[in-house]
Amino acid sequence: MISILIIYTGGTIGMVNDSKTGTLIPFDFEQIQNNVPELARLDYQLSVHSFDPILDSSNMHPKIWTELAELIKEKYNEFDGFVILHGSDTMSYTASALSFMLQNLAKPVVLTGSQLPIGEIRTDAKENLITALEIAATKKDGKAMVPEVAVYFDFQLFRGNRSIKNDSEKFEAFSSPNYPILAEAGVNLDFFSNYILPIPTKEFQIHTKFNSNIGVLKMYPGITENAVRAITESKVDAIVLESFGSGNTTTADWFIACLQEAISSDKIIVDISQCNGGSVQLGKYETSRKLQKMGVLSGYDMTFEATVTKLMYLMGKGLALDEIKKIMEISIAGELTN
């Protein structure tokens, strides 16, 4: 029988209405079969691991990612797949981080959640949970259909490090602007195997050290030198530069000088676009040519979530500066196209 480990970290999906107070309280996942009777029809062996205490996803932290990775490693040979129930606000960050941490992953790790609590009449929680379990259990020729970290939400499966949360109210809360969906749930559960990572040949292992000392510099018309220097002269190890369009910034002399000084002090600067869709193309316009010449890295079409967590991961490995810069511009887990 297929065995799936459900890892409950928190979030809206794990809430029910208290009939006495009317407030939302954590769902008892030890009683999951009673609360979601449809699961019995899946014919899977389900086990549950609940975090204690339950987390609001706004409090997500690299330490929790380490706990998740270590738990998956500990249980890796016992289960065919893993479903992580997670608050939607930081789900894409966790999915991106795990995609780098879980190296040579040959089993599905599917994150899901909901916009409405599982006890609400119109909840999206049941469908998201049941289909996430089906995805985690699906095999082809005896091997996992989706051997990677993915996010399932509102009938679509996204590569974890390509996903973003783009709506706080609609059921279709997630999207993947720069990469096709991996699967779609309709009358049938359709997988698009040409977009799914292949089964790895090397042994599964995890990496759990992070360096989260990262600053974020978002461009806007009229940004001042003081505002920029507050980031470039801070004691961060890396800066994510959110630029206009395909990687463009102001060409003011003071701005270029600020970035050059930061790079000269061994800070890593990665340029990503403020646009959800499309890619950074350093050097395409005059406004980005100077960035390219001074050593600003291109984030290509990476999401903000993937860029930040990839930096944390690479800097946490203690690699040489030049090695980190090299790896930031290539795909290591399907996170970018260049």
Image: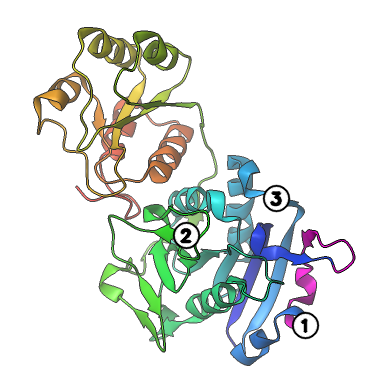
The amino acid type, in three-letter code, at marker 3 is: Leu
> Which residue is rendered at x = 36% and y = 82% of the image?
190
30 in the magenta segment:
yes
Name the front one of labels 2 and 3: 2
User: Residue 211 location in percent, x, y?
Assistant: 51, 31
Residue bounds of the magenta highlight:
19-34
Q: Which residue: 9% across, 24% down?
A: 286
The residue pinned by badge 2 equals 173
Type of the residue with mark 2: Ala
On whether residue 38 falls in the magenta region, the answer is: no
Q: Earlier in the sequence, mark 1 or mark 3?
A: 1
C-alpha separation, residue under disc 2 versus residue under disc 1 = 28 Å
Q: What separation in Å lies between label 1 and label 3 (alpha carbons)?
A: 23 Å
> Residue 159, how many percent across, how many down?
39, 61
Task: Identify residue for label 3.
Answer: 55
Residue under pointer 1? 34
Of labels 2 and 1, earlier in sequence is 1
Which image quadrant is residue 6 in?
Answer: bottom right
Q: Note whether residue 11 is visible.
A: yes
Give the residue at x 44% y 74%. Answer: 155
